[in-house]
Image (spheres, rainbow, N blue to C red):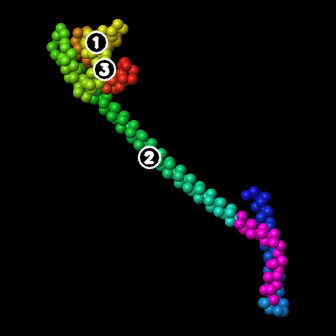
């Protein structure tokens, strides 16, 4: 409601009340006149009836407006309370969601750290072994090379390692790419494998150890390297 309309109702209300008060005063003064209470009551009724109908309507309208304003204020207060409670609940839910997200991230981080640690330990154990699981031979079968890989890589990561070797060289330790990549894991340049053993050209075990170290250091593990390979078809 606008300030003008409120003021209008207030003025009308005051006018009507003044009029009623005047009537009441006249009625009260008439009690001292001859005729007793019966005459005063009759006088009151006649004077109230004489109040203009328009003023009576204005008084009633002002009263209704006040009631409507009070109800609107109460409704606003209730809506504000509901909104604040809803916001509080949403904030609490958001806080719980953030906490769960942090816990999940921490758990995943711990899991990855454990996997990297296990992979490094496996690689370290492999490095302490001789450069060959089998006696050095002039040639090796696929079954022999895979047996070497199982021992060097370990059961937990062997399948992922095997998937990569299947695609890179089909387990041919003498596989050569025109680009210069060489061996089971297609090291490029091939001479990188000399960091594990000078016999990298002819010894599958040397190539397997170098490949395992590369996968662990670059991707975290053979399985993570395999996940990368599936997306990029290279690693």
User: Residue 96: which disc?
Assistant: 2
- Taking the magenta stretch, the answer to whether it contains residue 40 is yes
User: Relative to 103, is 25 above or below?
Assistant: below
Residue 96 in view of the camera: yes
Quadrant in the picture for residue 75: bottom right
The crowd level at tag 3 (other Cα within 10 Å; few <14, some 14-19, many 20+) is many
Q: CA distance from mark 2 to mark 1?
A: 52 Å
User: Residue 183: which disc?
Assistant: 1
Please report whichever mark, 2 or 1, sits nearer to the chain's N-terminal start.
2
Give the SS element for disc 3. Answer: helix
User: Residue 164: which disc?
Assistant: 3
Judging depth in this view, the residue of 15 and 142 nearest the camera is 142
Q: CA distance from mark 1 to mark 3?
A: 12 Å
Judging depth in this view, the residue of 150 and 45 nearest the camera is 45
- Taking the magenta stretch, the answer to whether it contains residue 113 is no
For discs 3 and 2, the disc positioned in front in the rendered view: 3
For discs 2 and 1, the disc positioned in front in the rendered view: 1
Residue 175: where, in percent of width, then height?
28, 10
For image coordinates 50% across by 48% down, the residue present is 91
Dominant SS in magenta? helix
């Amino acid at each position: 409601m606008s300030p003008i309309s409120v003021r209008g109702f207030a003025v009308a209300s005051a006018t009507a009340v003044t009029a009623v008060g005047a009537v009441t005063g006249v009625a009260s003064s008439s009690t001292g006149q001859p005729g007793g209470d019966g005459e005063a009551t009759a006088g009151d009724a006649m004077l109230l009836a004489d109040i203009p109908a328009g003023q009576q309507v204005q008084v009633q309208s002002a009263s209704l407006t006040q009631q409507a304003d009070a109800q609107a204020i109460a409704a606003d207060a209730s809506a504000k309370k509901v909104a604040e409670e809803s916001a509080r609940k949403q904030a609490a839910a958001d806080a719980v969601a953030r906490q769960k997200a942090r816990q999940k991230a921490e758990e995943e981080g711990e899991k990855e750290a454990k996997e990297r640690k296990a992979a490094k330990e496996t690689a370290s154990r492999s490095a302490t072994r001789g450069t060959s699981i089998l006696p050095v031979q002039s040639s090796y079968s696929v079954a022999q090379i895979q047996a070497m890989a199982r021992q060097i890589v370990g059961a937990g990561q062997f399948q992922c390692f095997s998937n990569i070797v299947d695609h890179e060289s089909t387990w041919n330790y003498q596989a050569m790419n025109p680009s210069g990549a060489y061996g089971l894991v297609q090291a490029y340049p091939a001479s990188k494998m000399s960091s594990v053993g000078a016999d990298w050209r002819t010894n599958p075990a040397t190539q397997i150890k170098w490949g395992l170290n590369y996968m662990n250091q670059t991707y975290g593990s053979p399985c993570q390297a395999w996940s990368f390979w599936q997306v990029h078809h290279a690693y």
